[in-house]
Image (cartoon, rainbow, N blue to C red):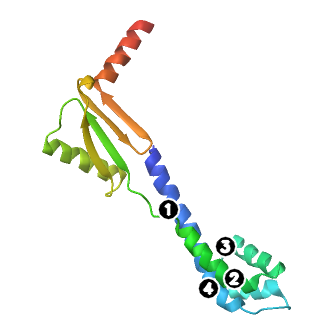
Amino acid sequence: MATTVDAKAIAGTLYEALIGAALEQLQAAAPKLTGIAGGDVAQRVDAALPAGALPQVRNFLLGLANEGLLDQLDDVVTAFGSFSAGPPAQALAAVVTSAVELSADQQATVSADLRKRYGADTKVSFDTDTSLIGGLIIRIGDQVLDNSLRTRLSAVQRNMLTS
Protein backbone atom coordinates (compact mmCIF):
# COMPACT_ATOMS: atom_id res chain seq x y z
CA MET A 1 0.00 0.00 0.00
CA ALA A 2 1.39 3.41 -0.94
CA THR A 3 2.03 5.90 1.83
CA THR A 4 0.63 9.43 1.78
CA VAL A 5 4.01 10.78 0.75
CA ASP A 6 4.23 8.30 -2.12
CA ALA A 7 0.72 9.21 -3.29
CA LYS A 8 1.56 12.92 -3.21
CA ALA A 9 4.75 12.34 -5.19
CA ILE A 10 2.89 10.26 -7.77
CA ALA A 11 0.10 12.84 -8.05
CA GLY A 12 2.70 15.60 -8.42
CA THR A 13 4.33 13.72 -11.26
CA LEU A 14 0.98 13.35 -13.04
CA TYR A 15 0.18 17.03 -12.52
CA GLU A 16 3.54 18.15 -13.90
CA ALA A 17 3.18 15.86 -16.93
CA LEU A 18 -0.31 17.14 -17.80
CA ILE A 19 0.54 20.80 -17.28
CA GLY A 20 3.82 20.37 -19.18
CA ALA A 21 2.04 18.73 -22.10
CA ALA A 22 -0.57 21.50 -22.25
CA LEU A 23 2.12 24.19 -22.14
CA GLU A 24 4.15 22.53 -24.92
CA GLN A 25 1.06 22.25 -27.10
CA LEU A 26 0.13 25.90 -26.56
CA GLN A 27 3.70 27.00 -27.30
CA ALA A 28 3.68 24.99 -30.53
CA ALA A 29 0.34 26.39 -31.68
CA ALA A 30 0.82 30.05 -30.74
CA PRO A 31 3.09 31.11 -33.63
CA LYS A 32 0.82 29.38 -36.14
CA LEU A 33 -2.26 31.19 -34.87
CA THR A 34 -0.88 34.71 -34.99
CA GLY A 35 -3.16 37.03 -36.90
CA ILE A 36 -5.78 34.50 -37.98
CA ALA A 37 -9.17 35.99 -38.61
CA GLY A 38 -12.22 34.71 -40.37
CA GLY A 39 -12.40 31.44 -42.22
CA ASP A 40 -12.78 28.11 -40.49
CA VAL A 41 -11.14 28.83 -37.15
CA ALA A 42 -11.61 25.28 -35.89
CA GLN A 43 -9.75 23.91 -38.90
CA ARG A 44 -6.92 26.40 -38.39
CA VAL A 45 -6.66 25.55 -34.68
CA ASP A 46 -6.56 21.84 -35.51
CA ALA A 47 -3.81 22.47 -38.07
CA ALA A 48 -1.79 24.52 -35.56
CA LEU A 49 -1.90 21.89 -32.81
CA PRO A 50 0.50 18.95 -32.71
CA ALA A 51 -0.93 15.49 -33.35
CA GLY A 52 -2.57 14.00 -30.27
CA ALA A 53 -3.11 17.37 -28.60
CA LEU A 54 -5.19 17.44 -25.45
CA PRO A 55 -8.85 18.21 -26.20
CA GLN A 56 -8.79 20.79 -23.38
CA VAL A 57 -6.05 22.73 -25.20
CA ARG A 58 -8.06 22.67 -28.44
CA ASN A 59 -11.21 23.81 -26.64
CA PHE A 60 -9.29 26.56 -24.90
CA LEU A 61 -7.92 27.87 -28.19
CA LEU A 62 -11.36 27.72 -29.80
CA GLY A 63 -12.76 29.64 -26.84
CA LEU A 64 -10.11 32.33 -27.27
CA ALA A 65 -10.90 32.50 -30.98
CA ASN A 66 -14.65 32.79 -30.33
CA GLU A 67 -14.01 35.66 -27.91
CA GLY A 68 -11.63 37.36 -30.34
CA LEU A 69 -8.69 36.97 -27.97
CA LEU A 70 -6.26 34.95 -30.08
CA ASP A 71 -4.15 38.08 -30.49
CA GLN A 72 -3.30 37.74 -26.78
CA LEU A 73 -2.24 34.09 -27.03
CA ASP A 74 1.50 34.78 -26.70
CA ASP A 75 0.92 36.68 -23.45
CA VAL A 76 -1.42 33.97 -22.18
CA VAL A 77 1.13 31.23 -22.94
CA THR A 78 3.89 33.20 -21.17
CA ALA A 79 1.68 33.75 -18.12
CA PHE A 80 0.60 30.10 -18.10
CA GLY A 81 4.24 29.00 -18.22
CA SER A 82 5.12 31.06 -15.17
CA PHE A 83 1.90 30.08 -13.39
CA SER A 84 2.31 26.36 -14.03
CA ALA A 85 5.87 26.37 -12.71
CA GLY A 86 4.47 27.30 -9.28
CA PRO A 87 6.61 28.24 -6.33
CA PRO A 88 9.80 26.28 -5.79
CA ALA A 89 9.22 23.19 -3.70
CA GLN A 90 10.33 23.71 -0.15
CA ALA A 91 12.42 21.11 1.61
CA LEU A 92 10.66 19.22 4.35
CA ALA A 93 11.84 19.88 7.89
CA ALA A 94 12.01 16.94 10.27
CA VAL A 95 12.38 17.23 14.02
CA VAL A 96 13.50 14.04 15.77
CA THR A 97 12.88 14.01 19.51
CA SER A 98 14.50 11.38 21.73
CA ALA A 99 14.81 10.75 25.48
CA VAL A 100 18.57 11.13 25.39
CA GLU A 101 20.89 12.83 22.94
CA LEU A 102 21.58 10.56 20.00
CA SER A 103 25.16 9.77 19.03
CA ALA A 104 26.54 11.10 15.75
CA ASP A 105 26.18 7.63 14.19
CA GLN A 106 22.56 7.34 15.32
CA GLN A 107 21.79 10.84 14.02
CA ALA A 108 23.41 9.97 10.69
CA THR A 109 21.37 6.75 10.42
CA VAL A 110 18.08 8.47 11.25
CA SER A 111 18.88 11.36 8.87
CA ALA A 112 19.77 8.97 6.04
CA ASP A 113 16.55 6.99 6.55
CA LEU A 114 14.41 10.14 6.56
CA ARG A 115 16.13 11.56 3.47
CA LYS A 116 15.70 8.25 1.67
CA ARG A 117 11.99 8.24 2.44
CA TYR A 118 11.15 11.96 2.12
CA GLY A 119 13.79 13.31 -0.27
CA ALA A 120 17.44 14.23 -0.24
CA ASP A 121 16.74 17.86 0.64
CA THR A 122 14.97 17.00 3.93
CA LYS A 123 16.38 19.08 6.77
CA VAL A 124 16.71 17.07 9.98
CA SER A 125 17.16 18.49 13.48
CA PHE A 126 17.38 16.68 16.80
CA ASP A 127 15.88 17.49 20.22
CA THR A 128 15.73 15.71 23.56
CA ASP A 129 12.79 15.27 25.91
CA THR A 130 13.50 13.28 29.08
CA SER A 131 9.80 12.56 29.62
CA LEU A 132 9.87 10.15 26.66
CA ILE A 133 11.75 7.45 28.61
CA GLY A 134 12.81 5.87 25.30
CA GLY A 135 12.05 5.70 21.60
CA LEU A 136 11.62 8.53 19.11
CA ILE A 137 9.03 11.05 18.01
CA ILE A 138 9.55 12.30 14.47
CA ARG A 139 7.64 15.33 13.20
CA ILE A 140 7.96 15.79 9.45
CA GLY A 141 5.70 17.97 7.37
CA ASP A 142 2.17 17.33 8.62
CA GLN A 143 2.99 13.86 9.98
CA VAL A 144 3.96 12.75 13.47
CA LEU A 145 5.57 9.33 13.84
CA ASP A 146 5.42 8.53 17.55
CA ASN A 147 7.30 5.42 18.60
CA SER A 148 8.13 6.59 22.09
CA LEU A 149 8.01 4.38 25.14
CA ARG A 150 5.71 6.92 26.82
CA THR A 151 3.13 6.46 24.03
CA ARG A 152 3.42 2.69 24.09
CA LEU A 153 2.98 2.61 27.89
CA SER A 154 -0.05 4.90 27.61
CA ALA A 155 -1.55 2.51 25.06
CA VAL A 156 -0.98 -0.45 27.38
CA GLN A 157 -2.58 1.49 30.24
CA ARG A 158 -5.65 2.37 28.10
CA ASN A 159 -5.99 -1.26 27.04
CA MET A 160 -5.84 -2.43 30.65
CA LEU A 161 -8.46 0.09 31.74
CA THR A 162 -10.88 -0.86 28.96
CA SER A 163 -10.52 -4.60 29.60
Q: Which of marks 3 and 2 is nearer the N terminus?
A: 3
Q: Which of marks 4 and 2 is nearer the N terminus?
A: 4
Question: Which of pointers 3 and 2 indicates the residue nearer the eye?
Answer: 2
Q: Give how far apart the Cα atoms at labels 4 and 2 are.
A: 11 Å
Which residue is labeled 3 in the image?
54
The answer to whether 24 appears left or right of 150 in the picture is right
Mark sitting on residue 28: 4
The answer to whether 95 appears left or right of 64 in the picture is left
Q: Give how far apart the Cα atoms at labels 1 and 3 are.
A: 17 Å
Mark sitting on residue 149: none
Residue type at tag 4: Ala
Q: Under tag 4, what secondary structure?
A: helix
Q: Can residue 102 be seen in this view?
A: yes
Q: Which of marks 1 and 3 is nearer the N terminus?
A: 1
* Residue 119 figure quarter: bottom left
Which residue is labeled 1 in the image?
13
Q: Give how far apart the Cα atoms at labels 3 and 2 are.
A: 17 Å
The answer to whether 126 appears left or right of 118 in the picture is left
Residues at marks 2 and 1 touching, judged by CB atoms closer than 8 Å:
no
Residue type at tag 3: Leu
* Residue 30 figure quarter: bottom right
Q: Under tag 1, what secondary structure?
A: helix
Which residue is labeled 2 in the image?
73
Q: Which of marks 1 and 4 is nearer the N terminus?
A: 1
Residue 58 or residue 122, whichever sits in front: 122
Relative to 5, residue 135 above or below: above
Looking at the picture, how far across and down is residue 78, in whole percent? 60, 79
Residue type at tag 2: Leu
Residue pictured at 79% horizontal, 75% vertical = 63
Residue type at tag 1: Thr
Looking at the picture, how far across and down is residue 35, in whole percent? 75, 93
